[in-house]
Amino acid sequence: MLAAHAPYPGSIQKKILVITLSCLLGMCVVISLVSYYVFQNYLQRSLIGSTETSLQLLTDSIDSHMDDVSRMVQFCQTNPGIATYIASNPNPGSVLSVATYDRIYEEYSNNPSKNYMNRVAIVTNDNFLQIVAATASSTSDLAAEVPELPYFETLLNDPGYNFSPGILKDPFHRKGKDVLPLIRPITYQFSSVQGGYLFLEISTDLFSDALRRYAVAEDSLLYLTIGDHTYLYGEGDLQETFPSFQYRKDLTSAAIVEGSQIAEVSDSQGINRLVVTVPLDMPDCYISQSISLWELRNQRLLLFCILGALLVSVLGIGTILMVVLNRMIHIPVSRIRSKMLRVAEGDFSRDPSIEWNHELGEIGRGINDLSENVIQLMNRMLQEEKEKQELEYRMLQSQVNPHFVYNTLNSIKWMASIQGADGICEMTTALAKLMKSISKGTSLLVPIREEFALLEDYFTIQRYRYGGTITLEFQVEEETILDCPILKFTLQPLVENAIFHGIEPKGAGHISIHALRETDASPGVIRIDVTDNGVGMSPEKAGQILASRQESSTDFFREIGVSNVHQRLQYEFGPSYGISVHSKEGCYTTMTIRIPDNKSEMAIKHSEYPDMSGRHHV
């Protein structure tokens, strides 16, 4: 009986619990990291995109006013009256000067952005006409003083608009208001020769008003870049600063605003900020806005809340999953284990409670079937034990009876010998030797020599029975063949079949036993041909002999037919060995036995049995 095992410390339930929790936590970590990375990038790009879109609206507003300024500049450069004024260079107060002034003032008055042009002056070599805002009026001689400005030649000779000086103090105003100077040449009419120039001062309110109306987060910074000068907007004013923009190629524009760029800049507190830069229509001029750190923090907080909710949800699902697994796996496994312990203690009764409608139920049914099979096996073993005891008793009886018969036949032999009945003596001797051979030993394999001797005793009895009308001949090509092993009682059923079915219908006949070694076979094969010159048989009948289980008619060899001999040979030596039948009706029948040439399996003394080679019986 099997001993019951104590519960294992490392149970499957604990392993499933650990594995499930590990997988869930690992999944949470992976999901959190991936979500954080994806959401962070999405958040960053979303803020960049929204900032670009807002800046685009801001720059459109500024560009609209700059377009008005550009129209005023183009008017001054292309108006014929101004060109005539430049060519004539009249004195102040002249009719041409007054007419030109009125025309410039009319254009200036109709310009939507006139409030952002503090000073518009047409300057010749000696004289000038200017339209100036009341807050920027002065008595300066522009014709003499403008050429003295340090940036005059640079702005005048540039083929396009040049704002490289940046925002400067108005040199012709006592309070020095901040302006953006612009100088463009004016040529003579019908000539490309410069005769004068336009001096225009753009008020910084053009930028400040637009930035003031632009709504941004409190911690977001706005920068205006003009040429090499960068100004920080704060409290309605532009203050020049010197930030270092580190443009990043790994971040691309989200709103795909043409020319926009993403950079990093360190503010006054040393905090790195992402900056979105959008160009203005003015050359080398940009508006930049830093991404709000407050918005980033709020969005990250929202992300963490989502990830926390996700983590709680996954853990909740994991808990539900563990409860379900406990009900679906742990409880059935515990019942199956309890049943196995009961089986180990000797309880083989069927337990229907472990036969569920799933895979574990299949295991439960298998255990129940196994328990019933064990009960049946134990009952069968008890029955076989009883039958074995009865068989041993019968075998003991069968061992006594042949010896008693053998001793009785031996007494008859001596009485027939004394009375001179040689035939009775010889037949009784053959029968006694046959009985002795049957009762002697339990070995299945015997040498061919012993099988021939048994066959000789059997044929002696049959010869007297048929009155000498049958003969038997042994032909052995090599003496060593007689030492090869063969199954006991292999040849007798074949000779009996030859006598009863081949020779007896004919009335007389001859049987030949031919033993030889097939030299062309590998491994070696011993062939024994049993041939009779009887009535023969058809091919169909020959095929049926090995398939049917015919019984012998003699008392000694009952139930040992040719087909049984064929099967015994194949069971013992393999499917390539056994018996084959060849016959011709009215002529002969040959039964060929093939067995392996292996005489090393049995040590046999040659002197124990007589020499059978070339023996002939009549």
Image (cartoon, rainbow, N blue to C red):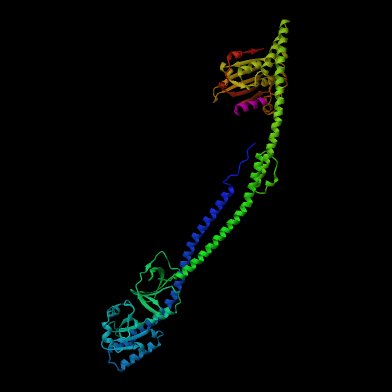
Numbered-mark total: 0
In this picture, is 240 found above or below 586? below
**Is residue 569 on the magenta stretch?**
yes
Magenta part, dominant SS? helix
- Please state the horizontal and vertical placement of residue 31, each as a whole percent of the image: 51, 59
- Please state the horizontal and vertical placement of residue 66, each as a whole percent of the image: 39, 80
Residue drawn at (38%, 67%) of the image:
247
- Please state the horizontal and vertical placement of residue 205, each as a whole percent of the image: 39, 82
Classify the position of the N terminus by image quarter: top right
Residue drawn at (69%, 12%) of the image:
429
Look at the image and tell me whether residue 312 can be seen: yes
Question: Image quarter for residue 160?
Answer: bottom left
Classify the position of the C terminus by image quarter: top right
State the residue in front, 59 or 316: 316
Look at the image and tell me whether residue 255 can be seen: no
State the residue in front, 286 or 79: 286
Q: Is residue 505 left or right of residue 607?
A: right
Question: Image quarter for residue 249?
Answer: bottom left
State the residue in front, 8 or 339: 8
In this picture, is 346 found above or below 330? above
- Please state the horizontal and vertical placement of residue 379, each as a whole percent of the image: 71, 34
Question: Image quarter for residue 345?
Answer: top right
Residue drawn at (71%, 6%) of the image:
417
**Is residue 306 on the magenta stretch?**
no
Q: Is residue 576 left or right of residue 32?
A: right
Segment tinted magenta in the rendering? 564-576
In this picture, is 205 found above or below 534? below
